[in-house]
Image: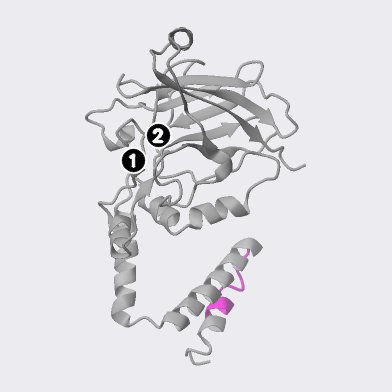
């Protein structure tokens, strides 16, 4: 059979018919079908396809131990959020993207510790509970936290000026499922624009900004792990997040307090911000 526009897709799909893993075979056949449909619709020139390959090569070459450019590309194309949305479990807190900066292990910390190792920025206290979908508190749940600093940078972006582990912490909930930690109010920030994904955004005249947020990964026995954010209410770019991750249920009021006694009890100085919210996990399927 000659390979031409009419026979191309069938020929490629047939080449995968002996793939032992049925799910892998399904994925490869669907990839060929949809990718070929894209090429037929857009009819790229040879030069355009070469540029596409060069772009993907540059994305791969930009990945390091502390930077994941392919995650960034998935994020700005909305694929990361679409996958998260398709895999959400009913009854739990809504999930969002992992993002490209969960690249190092968060240091274990005691409840109430500060994840801010620099001592600058507006003080902030974050607290809440980890619950099962039926409202039962989950003691000893693991709460992995990471965020940027008050200037919009993660520790891995500024190894010379931020100590490793700044803005990161690994906590375990108490007997009532509660967690709490001190930090600084995070800033909105641009995703990295010095690589191929940044050049793509510039060519499309898209801004690179994300609203202020704190990342969480939460795990508890018998429950499906949760990857999510909380977003700072009133932050710029809540309505145009560069990676499409904002959900209304995840926008939290970081209330400002001038109460000096409350600040002293929390281990910060007034004025400070306080965010209180629950993180709800769905039970694992039987």
User: Looking at the picture, how far across and down is residue 132, in whole percent?
Assistant: 70, 31
- For image coordinates 47% across by 52% down, the residue present is 244
Q: Are marks 2 and 1 in contact (CB under 8 Å)?
A: yes
Coloring scheme of the render?
A: one colour
Query: Where is residue 128, by image quadrant?
Result: top right
Is 14 in the magenta?
A: yes
Residue 214 seen in this snapshot:
yes
Q: Which residue is mark 1?
A: 66
Q: Mark 2 to mark 1: distance in Å? A: 7 Å
Q: Name the residue tied to disc 2.
A: 104
Viewer-side residue, 124 vs 281:
124
Q: Residue at x 22, y 30 (%)?
A: 160
Residues shaded magenta = 12-20
- Secondary structure state at the residue bearing disc 2: loop
Image location of residue 24, percent across then percent down? 59, 63
Quadrant showing the C terminus: top right
In the rendered image, residue 266, in percent from the top left (x then y), is placed at: 47, 12
Determine the residue positioned at 61% across, 74% down.
17
Q: Is residue 52 left or right of residue 95?
A: left
Instruction: From the top left corner, tell me how far across and down residue 227 is, in percent.
Output: 55, 40
| Mark 1 secondary-structure assignment | loop
Q: Is residue 21 visible?
A: no
């Amino acid at each position: 059979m000659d390979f031409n526009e009419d026979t191309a897709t069938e020929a490629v799909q047939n080449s995968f018919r002996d793939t032992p893993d049925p799910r892998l075979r399904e994925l490869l056949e669907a990839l060929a079908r949809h990718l070929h449909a894209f090429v037929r619709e857009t009819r790229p020139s040879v030069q355009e396809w070469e540029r596409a390959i060069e772009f993907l090569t540059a994305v791969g070459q930009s990945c390091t131990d502390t930077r994941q450019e392919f995650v960034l590309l998935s994020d700005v194309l909305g694929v990361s959020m679409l996958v998260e949305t398709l895999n959400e479990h009913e009854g739990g807190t809504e999930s969002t993207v992992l993002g490209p900066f969960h690249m190092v292990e968060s240091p274990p910390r005691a409840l109430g510790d500060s994840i801010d190792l620099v001592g600058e920025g507006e003080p902030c206290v974050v607290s809440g509970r980890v619950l099962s979908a039926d409202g039962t508190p989950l003691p000893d749940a693991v709460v992995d936290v990471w965020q940027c600093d008050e200037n919009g940078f993660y520790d891995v972006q500024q190894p010379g000026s931020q100590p490793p582990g700044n803005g990161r912490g690994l906590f375990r909930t108490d007997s009532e499922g509660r967690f709490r930690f001190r930090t600084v109010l995070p800033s909105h920030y641009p995703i990295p624009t010095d690589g191929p994904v940044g050049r793509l955004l510039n060519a499309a005249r898209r801004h690179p900004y994300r609203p202020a947020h704190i990342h969480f990964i939460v795990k508890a026995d018998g429950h499906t792990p949760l990857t999510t954010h909380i977003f700072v209410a009133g932050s710029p770019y809540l309505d145009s997040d560069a990676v499409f991750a904002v959900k209304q249920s995840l926008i939290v009021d970081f209330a400002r307090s001038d109460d000096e006694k409350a600040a002293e009890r929390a281990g910060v100085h007034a004025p400070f911000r306080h965010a209180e919210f629950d993180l709800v996990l769905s039970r694992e399927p039987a």
